[in-house]
Image (spheres, helix red, strand yellow):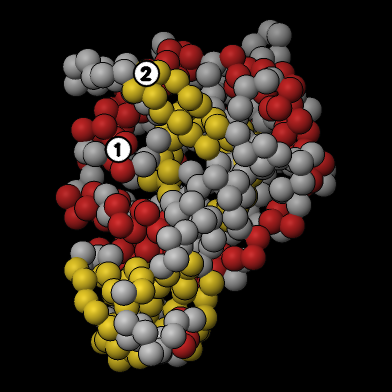
Amino acid sequence: MKATLSTMVRMALLSACVFATAAGAEEAKKVEFNADTPQMGFNNWNSTHCRDEFNEDMIRGVADKLISSGLRDAGYRHINLDDCWADWKRDKNGNLQPNLKRFPHGIKALADYVHERGFAFGLYSSAGTNTCEPHQANRGFPGGLGHEKQDAAYFASVGADYLKYDNCNNQKVPAKERYKAMGEALRATGKPIFYSLCEWGENKAWLWATDPAVGASSWRTTGDISDNYASMLKIFKENVVLDAYAGPGHWNDPDMLEVGNGGMTDVEYRSHFSLWSIMAAPLLIGTDLRKIKPDALEILLNKEVIAVDQDPLGVQGKRVRDTNGVHVIVKPLKDGSRAVAVFNEADAAQDVAVSAKELGLQASAKYRMRDLWKHSDAQGDGSIKLRLEPHATVMYRISAQ
């Protein structure tokens, strides 16, 4: 589905002492969220769309699974609801209201449940008269266009820490005007709310979304992802060339993760996760974690790859080679090391050689070559030579000895 704290101050989203009670009481812990690294967490859309299974029981179950699986401790700290959470009409005062069939205890109660377990809570709307999912009279649910102040006040009142703001039914009002209006409204609430624009790259938000008047921290650079290799590859190619526009507090967003949804092989999902991480993209899980298979969970729990995405230097990896279906992306890290991803988009295996010079390294030096998927070390001169299987990615962290 289309996707978004103000970079004006790069403020912490949420800092609270919480009592985690999913599997019995845990010690109170202070949890902080900020925009200085790409957002990580869960969004329901890729696995549920608007089906009935999207409801408060599912979200509570996902929150509990994020804890029991170790995903919360690995950094996945946002739980975001997508389209269809709201009732199809506003109340008599023009306020948004939840779909009580899906959320019988209301949105505030669900946000409290999420917060108590150490997560930030996110909601969805569209910068248009209606959202994207057709409902009544082939229109979406109520959108924020013309209701920005009222809706921002509602988001703050129910405890939302995150807003994904879509682009449907926009009445051809200029994009920056629409997104600026909601950005100003969110800031006026006095509550830090992560602002994620979802205008699908149609208006090149990377050129204007960091304007303090807009105040976004991430913006979609592409159309929606689908759970297949061709879609993932297309989106990677559109996003990888935008590295100059990303940095701490402002992130290119090539859409959410499909890992675990079943439309790609494990090799392709590892490439998906590797490429998103080296591009410093948001890592928002899009599969129903209550049903996830062990192999997919293992991919999402790779802390060495996550560390590349979350590196505090905040640089998006730069592609230094795009030849014969082989892509080489290099990302400098804060400790002076480099992350390198080598990706074979082709349908056949290829022998690949990458020189130290191509990676920006001194060929005469000695390096520690850490394979982030095999979790193994080797010593070398900084060069890489290997046979790369179809659709596969290898990922290294290279540091001077």
The residue that label 1 is drawn on is 73
Q: Quadrant of residue 247?
A: bottom right
In which quadrant of the rendered image does the C terminus lie? bottom left
Q: Residue at horizontal 65%, vertical 60%?
A: 245
Give the percent coordinates (x, y) of residue 2: 57, 47
Q: Residues within 10 Å of mark 2 (few under 14, many from 20)?
A: some
Q: Residue at horizontal 22%, vertical 53%?
A: 298
User: Can you see residue 325?
Assistant: no
Give the percent coordinates (x, y) of residue 378: 22, 76
Vertical arrangement, residue 86 with respect to residue 331, above or below: above
Q: What amino acid type should be assigned to the residue bearing mark 1?
A: Asp
Vertical arrangement, residue 347 with respect to residue 196, above or below: below
Q: Are marks 1 and 2 in contact (CB under 8 Å)?
A: no
Name the residue nearer the viewer: 49 or 285. 285
Q: Residue at horizontal 27%, vertical 49%?
A: 301
Q: Quadrant of residue 284?
A: top left
Q: Indicate which disc residue 18 carries.
A: 2
Vertical arrangement, residue 259 with respect to residue 395, above or below: above
Left or right: 138, with 233 as reference point: right
Mark 1 to mark 2: distance in Å?
A: 14 Å
Q: What amino acid type should be assigned to the residue bearing mark 2?
A: Val
Check the image and name the residue furthest to the top. 92
Mark closest to the chain's N terminus, 1 or 2: 2
Q: Residues within 10 Å of mark 1 (few under 14, many from 20)?
A: some
Q: How many marks?
A: 2
Give the percent coordinates (x, y) of residue 259: 33, 54
Circle 1: element type: helix
